[in-house]
Every structure is written in C-alpha cells, then in structure tokens.
Amino acid sequence: MKIATKYLLFVLVPVVTSVAVLSAGLYIRSSRAINEDVDRNLSYTARYLRDLINKEIETVSGDLTIILTNKSLEQYFMYLDINEMDYVEDARATLEENIEKIAMVKPQYAALMVFRSDGKGLVNITDKRVTYTYPDPRKRRWFRSALCLSKGESYTSGVYMCPEHKVPSLFVSQPYFYRGRLRGIGSIHIHVQDFFGKLLSDIEVGRRGYSYLVDSKGIIVAHKYPSRVGTDTSGLESTKGALAGNEGILVERAETGNISMKKSYLPLHEGLGIIVAQPLDEAMAISNRVKRYAVGISTIVTIFLLLLIFWVSRKIVIGPIRELSDATKKMFPGDLTETVKGDEIQHLAEVFKLAARSVNEHISSLRQIQERLKDQRQLLQTILDATPDLVCLQDRESVYQAVNTAFCQQISREGKDIVGKTDFDLFPADVARQNREENLKVINTRKPLEREDEIQTPKGKKWFHVVRVPVSDAEGNVVAVLCSGRDITQLKQIQARLIQSQKMESLGQLAACIAHEINTPLGIILGYAQLLLEEVPEGGDMHEGLETIIKQSKICGKIVSSLLTFSRETEATLVPVDMNQCIEEVVRVLEHSFKLDRVTIERDYDYNLPAITGDKDKFKQVFVNLLNNARDAIGTDGTISITTRLDEGNSELVISVTDTGRGIPPENIDHVFEPFFTTKAGGEGTGLGLMVTYGIIREHGGRIEVQSPPEAARKEKGEAARGTVFTIHLPVLEDRRPKNEGEETWDGKSTGVR
C-alpha cells in the first residue's frame, strides 16, 4: 500500500469511531444537559430580573437624592432657622416648582413628597399635581426607618395596599441633613404594577413563559399580565421558598389553572419574592428538538469531518509529501535549486484569531465608554436643570452650546431654540453687544467677571448676580465661557430694609434733639401769651392775635409731643394688654363717623390671643392713626378689615388693617414712615401719624410692614387691584392667654369670628 493510503486509513478509522461514540453519548446525555440548560436559563432570568429591579430602585434613590440636594430646600431651612418667615414660603414654593418639574419628567412616580423631621409636610406632588393635603408620616415605617439612616443612605419599604388608589405600592425614602442635623425626609411613592409591569413584560421566558412578584402574604403584586395581580399564591411551594429567603427551581402547577410549570424562585427584599415560570411542555419540546438536532448534526458532522480530513490530508500531508518526493528525485541528478514551501495556513489562522479578539475587546471598551459618557451627560443635565440658577455655556464665538431649564424659562424659549444661536439672535442689540464684550474680556484676561444686573420681568424687577468664568481645555487654551446667574432679589430687599431701618433710627435721634430744643422756648411763649390774654380786653385785634399765638403754639406742642413719642423719649406705662379689647374700644369711637361716609369696618378677631406687654394708650394711638389713614384713602363707599391672629411658630401676634382705598404709589411706599411725609392736600396732615406709629411699634419690640395693593387683591383682580394693608408683628408673653376657648370675652359675646 502507498504511504498516502496508509495515512488515510490510520486517521479516518479512529475519527469515525470517535464520532460514533460521541454521538451515542450526546444522544444519551442531551436530555439531561438541555434540562440543566433550561434550569440555568430560568435561574439566570430570575437573577437578571432581580438586578434590573434593584437598578430601578437605585435610580429612584438617585432621583430622590437630586430632589434633596435642591438649593431651595437648603434655603428653606436657612430662612427657617433665622425666623425669616416671609422667605420660608418663597423657598418652599420654589422647591415645589422644581419637584413638580421632576414629576412631569418622571410620570411613573405616583407621588413625590418632602417632610420635615417633625412630620410637617413641605411638598406633595401626587399624580403629577400639587396637593396640600399631607398624610401623617410619623405612623409610617418608611418615615421612621429613614430617621435612623445616615446621610446618603436610602430605605425601601415593603409592599402595602395604597389607600388612595387601592393598588400594591411601596416607598423609597431618604433623610435630608442641613448643617449636620437631620431636618427632613424625602419620599417617592411607587405603584408596583405600574412601575415594574413593563419590566416584567420585557423579560422573555420562551413563547408562553412569564414572571411575577409576590408580597409577604403570597399575593401577586406585579405580573406580566396585569389581570393576575391580586391572585393568592401562598399555597405554592415556589412562593413559600422565595419568601423564606431561598433560591431554587421546581415543577408545580401555575398560579391559575392546572398547567404544569417549571419555575425559578428567589427572594428580592423586605418580604418580596421573584418567580419566573415556563410551561413544562414548552421546556421539554426544546429538549426533544435538541435531541433530534443532535443526532442529525452528529451525522452531518461525521460526513463533513470525513470529507474535510480527506481534503486537508491531500492538501497538507499528501501534497507536501509528493512535492518533497519530487524534489528529492530531482536532487539525485544534482539539481539543488528546488525548494519545498512550508504550510502557512495555521500561522495565518492564529494571527486572524488574535486580531479578531483584539478588535472585539476594543469595540466592547468603546461601547462601555459611550454608555458611561451618555449616563454622565444625562446626570449633568439633570443636575443643571434642578438648580434654580441660570446656567449657560458659550464658545469663543458666543454661540450657545448648552443651557439649563431655568435659563430657558427666563427668556421664554426652549433649549433647542437656544443652542446653536448667539446673543444677537436672542436679545436686543445693546444687551447682546454687552454680553459679547464681557465674553471677550473673560477670554482675553482669563479671569472671571462678576456683576449685578437689574432686569425687568413680567413679574416685576429682579436682581441677578452674574458670574462669567473661562473654560480651558487640556492644553490651557480658553475654549468657552460658563455663565451663571443667581436671583438675589430677596437679598436686595433685605438690604433695602436694613438701610430704611438705619435711616429711621437716625431720624428718631434727630427728632429727639429738635424736640428738646423747641419744647422749652415753646412753653415760655405759650405761658406769656396766656398771661397777656388775661390782661387784654376781648374783641380787639390784640386779643385775636394772642388767641392765634396760643392756638398755633399748641399745634407746635402736639408736633413736639409726636416727635418725642417717635424718639422714645416719653415714658410708657407697660401692662398686659388685651389687644382685641384695645382695638374694639378704638373702633367703637370711630365707627359712627365712618358710617356717615359709608365706610364699613369688618372685624376678624382671634379671641384666643395671649397678652401683649405694652402701653394701652399708645396702642390706641396706633390704631386711631391707621384707621383714620384708611378712611382718608377710601373717601366714601369702602371697607376697612381688621384681622388679629397668633403666629405660634414665631411667637408673634399679627394684626392687619386692610382698606379698599386708592392705594399708595410704588414710588412713595418706601417713604410713608418718614417724618413730615404726606400725600394729603396742604393743611390736611402733618406727615407725623405713621412716623409716630412706627416709633410706638418699634418701642414695643415689634415691626410694621406695608403692602399696596395687598397680595390677596393682586391675585384676585390682577392689575386692577387697589387698596393697602398695614401688618403689625408684636412679640407675645408666654402662657398669658386672656380667655379660654368657649368663655365669654370682654364684650360679653362668645368667642368666634364676627
């Protein structure tokens, strides 16, 4: 036999025998292997589903972290700690707007809520709508558990039946710390089926398989098929195993009907279990098909291997042997130029495998980097949109590259209409030119630029602190300018109040000096004039002139007395004062004369008020001044409303006097408490009434504020609103209530609103 034939027999016989043995073994073990593979797939699907659910819960925790890092929440507690209650509500309203935006972007959240650590509600966005009804969280486990967490930790509650929507729900809560102290709890309310139902639908388990979640009672709370939610599966072994914290695979009936199912179960957390099920006949059909395929493939592989071995043998073994044989024959006559080529196929295959593996690794790395960049960009945009500051990024040509939601709202445009444009496309020419010059200055000097701008908006004038910062690349070249604008309108208002208070204090000192210098000579003039009047006969010009001197001297004396009252030079008698009684005594004196001009006085008293330490006569003077000013502002046909209430949070008694008069012009509202300032006709007013009122209130440790028109009238009538409201804040004595609830008051009537 030739060497080629011997080689083929030597190789083919063992190969054919091996393939036959392997085919038989494959046929026998295929059923077991396929069953194990089905089990592994079911187990892998269950674990994969658990990872997806945990990732979704982590996403919810991340959204909750973004809510609690909102700047408005920090401002809320900052103003609350310094008792600036006027700004506490503004900060809460801003926080509510920001969370409402997140609720619109995240419709899968049933409710987003923020509470103070004492259980008081701050924000409640339910079903994408703002509501001011807050449940008592102190009785809820998710609230109490969150109080025990450290900063950055989150708590996910067990499943319970939502009382409002009657569906299975859970809470994700997280504590909020301000200056190292636990001050609040944030919570996101999730309907289990609405939140995880799509996730369960996207998980494919064969053609008829499905997955579902069960709670601690064995009730289905989320299912690929929503109609099965609420089914009791507590009697199934898969449910018992999952709720016991075990993981495994078994065959049992379906949760509805008597269909045999292969199920994989494992625990999730806090009394929740995951079940992945596939009909048994479908799983076994795969096994039977695979066995048939295995036999067919084994036969095909055997034939293919025979042909391949025969061809490879001829190409790799027999061909080179013949070539070597021919070359050897040529060597005998002396021909040494013949060469024999080696086989390079194996080398090329190895090189190709290495190249393919390297390319695959690079592609996987690039995909991972792309996903990370996408996530980071989305996170950065979310953070920018959550901040109340106006933020934008412009390149060297002042073309907008990125903007946040606050910036878009400020100029009433969408982000897609801003990015790619310059300031000259969006703003008036003078504003655009100024912005361009400032950008060039930042780029050329490489230094930040700061300024304060006053901007006219539909809601009035606002102040912004604008900062422009250069942005450099890795080589240090300035490639862009980052601009941020912060609303400092409230800060400007506080500064203006401080300046006004200092000015009034200086005026008080000046008034005291003037009063002392005038009081003595004025008394001498009045005394001598009265002596002369006794000696001059009546009816003469001299007698009439002396009466005029006495009358005008007394008027000057009243002015001096008012100046002394404002400068706190007069001695006050401090006693506990029932403020409702004090106001009512003044109203009873003035009410009749007011009715002649068809001016009605309405009262809204809180009869459970504590006592005020002060001078009752001076308080009466305050209310006389305010009521007379209100009547003068109305003229005829109007209403004056007097309201008293207790602000327990600030331990203050709040009194407001509101009229429906012509109001105070904006240019005069900052001057109403200045001495001798009046808008009345000549001879009708001295301009000292509100100045004296201001001094009396300040003497009693309180403050008085004015607003024209009132906020309530502005909301109801808009630009047509009129009127003025003066609001007095006075500190109260602790545990000094004049009357208990249900007792008769000083006017003989039971307590209530009249």
Image: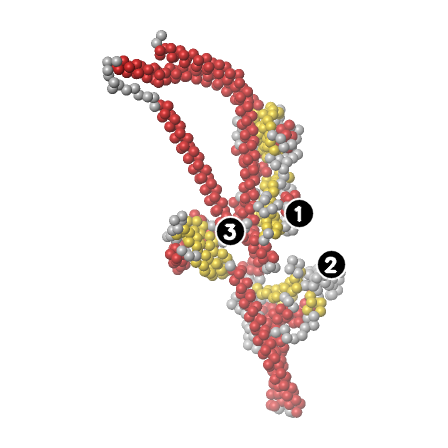
Earlier in the chain: of badge 2 and badge 1, it is: 1
Task: Give the left or right position of residue 273, taking residue 464 as reference.
Answer: right
Q: In percent of the image, x 66 and y 92: which residue is there? A: 535
Which of labels 3 and 2 is toward the front? 3
Q: Quadrant of the C terminus?
A: bottom right
- Amino acid at circle 1: Arg
Earlier in the chain: of badge 1 and badge 3, it is: 1
Is residue 417 depicted above or below 719 in this figure? above
Q: How is the image coloured?
A: secondary structure
Per the model, the C-alpha gap separating discs 1 and 3 is 30 Å
Q: In percent of the image, x 58 and y 28: which residue is there? A: 264
- Toward which corner of the image does residue 691 lie, by quadrant? bottom right
Residue 544, given in percent of the width and then of the height, sits at 61, 88
- Disc 1 marks which residue? 138
Q: Secondary structure at mark 1?
A: helix
Is residue 149 depicted above or below 568 in this figure? above
Task: Give the left or right position of residue 346, taking residue 614 as reference.
Answer: left
- The answer to whether the residue labelled 3 contacts the one labelled 2, judged by CB atoms less than 8 Å apart, is no
Q: Secondary structure at mark 3?
A: loop
Earlier in the chain: of badge 3 and badge 2, it is: 3
- Disc 3 marks which residue? 387
Q: Is residue 98 visible?
A: yes
Q: Which mark is residue 741?
A: 2
Which of labels 2 and 1 is toward the front? 1
